[in-house]
Structures are given as structure tokens and as C-alpha cells.
Amino acid sequence: MGILCGFVFSLFFDVANVPLTLIFVFPLFTLFDWSITAFGISKSHNFLRTFFGFLLGVAYALGLILLITDFPNPVVLSIGAFYVLASIFLIYLKNKIKKV
């Protein structure tokens, strides 16, 4: 749903004017929510997961549009690389803690 809303947003507004901090910050909520749940700190709630997933989808769509229309956009590529590396590290950490 978030991805769809991101694409619909791009039909009416110039995505180039969207602050890149939104594309960086929106996925952070999902990453934090997943981490808190995965490491057993707290349980998540369906509303939070849905809302954070929506923000993640919006960020994906806007980032993809910017990447395609302004290739190569080093900031968008860096944001994507950051999340790939952060995800790999957190999954590694989770699996390492689970084995201990």
C-alpha cells in the first residue's frame, strides 16, 4: 500500500523536491520495530507494523523514482547501501545471539 501511495504521490508532485531525509528516516521506523521484536525487547503491535510498513513502502517508491529519474544519485544509493548493510548486520547479530 505504501509503495502504491508513493507512486501516486509522484503523479501529482515532483519527487525531486522531496527531502532525502524522508527517504532515509521512513525506513528507520521499520528497522527499529523489527529489531525490538527480533531481539525480544518488546512485542510489536499490528497497527505499528502496518503504519511503519506503509512508511517503508513510501520511501521505497520515492527512492526508486529518484534513482531512475536522477541516476546515479549518490545519496539515494548511499541510503540503500546503508539499509542493506544495517539489515545484514542485524540479521547476523540476531542469528549469533540465538545460537549462544
Image (cartoon, rainbow, N blue to C red):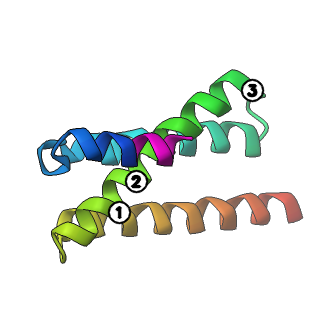
* Type of amino acid at the residue the image marks with label 3: Asn
Pinpoint residue 23: horizontal percent, then vertical percent: 32, 47
Residue sitting at x 18%, y 71%: 74
Residue farthest toward the front in the current orientation of the protein: 11
Pinpoint residue 70: horizontal percent, then vertical percent: 15, 69
Mark 3 surroundings: few (<14), some (14-19) or many (≥20) residues within 10 A: few
Disc 3 + disc 1, Cβ < 8 Å: no
User: Under tag 3, what secondary structure?
Assistant: helix
- What is the spatial separation of the Cα atoms under label 3 and label 1, in whole angstroms? 26 Å
Mark 2 surroundings: few (<14), some (14-19) or many (≥20) residues within 10 A: many
Q: Give the residue at mark 2.
A: 61
Range of magenta residues: 1-6
Q: Give the residue at mark 3.
A: 46
> Which mark is first along the chain, 1 or 3?
3
Q: Tell me the tag on residue 64.
A: 1
* Type of amino acid at the residue the image marks with label 2: Ala
Within the magenta stretch, is there residue 65?
A: no
User: Under tag 1, what secondary structure?
Assistant: helix
Residue sitting at x 32%, y 40%: 9
> Which mark is first along the chain, 3 or 2?
3
User: Under tag 2, what secondary structure?
Assistant: helix
Quarter of the image where one finds residue 71: bottom left
Disc 1 + disc 2, Cβ < 8 Å: yes
Query: Could you tell whether 65 is left or right of 83 in the image?
Result: left
Residue sitting at x 28%, y 46%: 10
Residue farthest toward the right in the current orientation of the protein: 99
Residue farthest toward the left in the current orientation of the protein: 17
Which one is in front, 64 or 7?
7
Q: Would you place residue 16 above or below residue 37 in this image? A: below
Within the magenta stretch, is there residue 5?
A: yes
